[in-house]
Amino acid sequence: MESHLYEGVEPSDFYNKLENVLSTQTSAFKINIDLGYELVSKTDPDDTRYFYPNLANTHVFNNPIAINSKADFQKKVISEIRSMELADKLNYLSSGYKLKAITAVNIFTYHREHSLGDSEAVIPKIIRKNKHVINFPKTNNKCVFHCIAWHTFQSPKKDPRRIQAQVKEAFKRYCSFKGIKYSLRLFRSFKPIDLLQLDEVEDCFQLGINVYKMDVVMEM
């Protein structure tokens, strides 16, 4: 995790600071933003209270936002914040106080360095030969959809080598969930699902996904 704290921020600088941080990212990540602000009493202008940027009470988003492409910068972060009334995101001592100014911003980024479903990855033999592991012959960057298809396809005769129709149906459902128009070309060229996207995959299919990391000596 990285944090980027900016204090003494003018309103006109807020988006510049945010875009500067976003533009330096080179891999998938999640982001949240904490605000530092000053309140002033509605009846006494000398009565002011300052709140330091704190994840516990000044975050902009309820949960960190997953960023998987540069297009997400504008769509999920910049545009979303511009549509907000930031004053409504803050905690107030009482109804007797109002916002004087937002004066600081702390930008948190949570990094992920790799994608799931890489067809070039070599799975250790001890995993491939495990009788409890379903070994799909070829997933073409769609191993997540193969797993979902296998899980949802209720047939006593299902075969991991013959579930392409179910894989496509799972992919179509995901496209519909994301508001993407399905096409065979998209299906064939689709990039691997990233770890950061699993939360929305769970929402789409209404299931829980557990991810484990194992090294060659079987340590998890």
Image: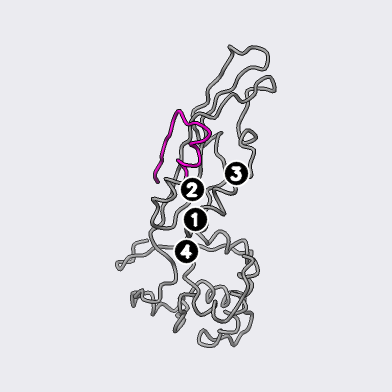
N-terminal of the two: label 3 or label 2? 2
Residue 169, percent across and down?
62, 78
State the residue in front, 118 or 178: 178
- Residue 82 is marked as 3
The stretch of residues the image draws in magenta is 1-18
Q: Residue at x 61, y 30 (%)?
A: 91
Residue type, numbered disc 3 = Arg
Q: Nearer the viewer, residue 52 or 56?
A: 52
Q: Position of residue 12 (x, y in %)?
A: 52, 35
* Mark 1–mark 2 distance (CA, rounded to whole Å): 7 Å
Mark 4 highlights which residue? 194
Secondary element under disc 2, as helix, strand or loop, is strand
- Residue 109: in sight, yes or no? yes
- Give the SS element for disc 4: loop
Which residue shows up at 48% across the image and 51% down it?
Answer: 30
The Cα atoms of the two marked residues, 4 and 3, are separated by 27 Å
Three-letter amino acid code at the position of disc 2: Ile
Q: Is residue 6 magenta?
A: yes
Q: Which residue is mark 1?
A: 67
Q: CA distance from mark 3 to mark 2?
A: 16 Å
Q: Nearer the viewer, residue 220 or 72?
A: 72
Residue in the picture at 54% in, 52% down: 74
**35 w.r.t. 162: above or below:** above
- Mark 3, Cα crowd under 10 Å, few <14 / some 14-19 / many 20+, is few
- Of the 4 image quadrants, the one containing the C terminus is bottom left
Visible residue check, residue 123 = no
Q: Please give the residue where the numbered disc 2 appears in the rendered image.
A: 31
Question: Reading the chain from its start, which is encountered first: label 1 or label 2?
Answer: 2
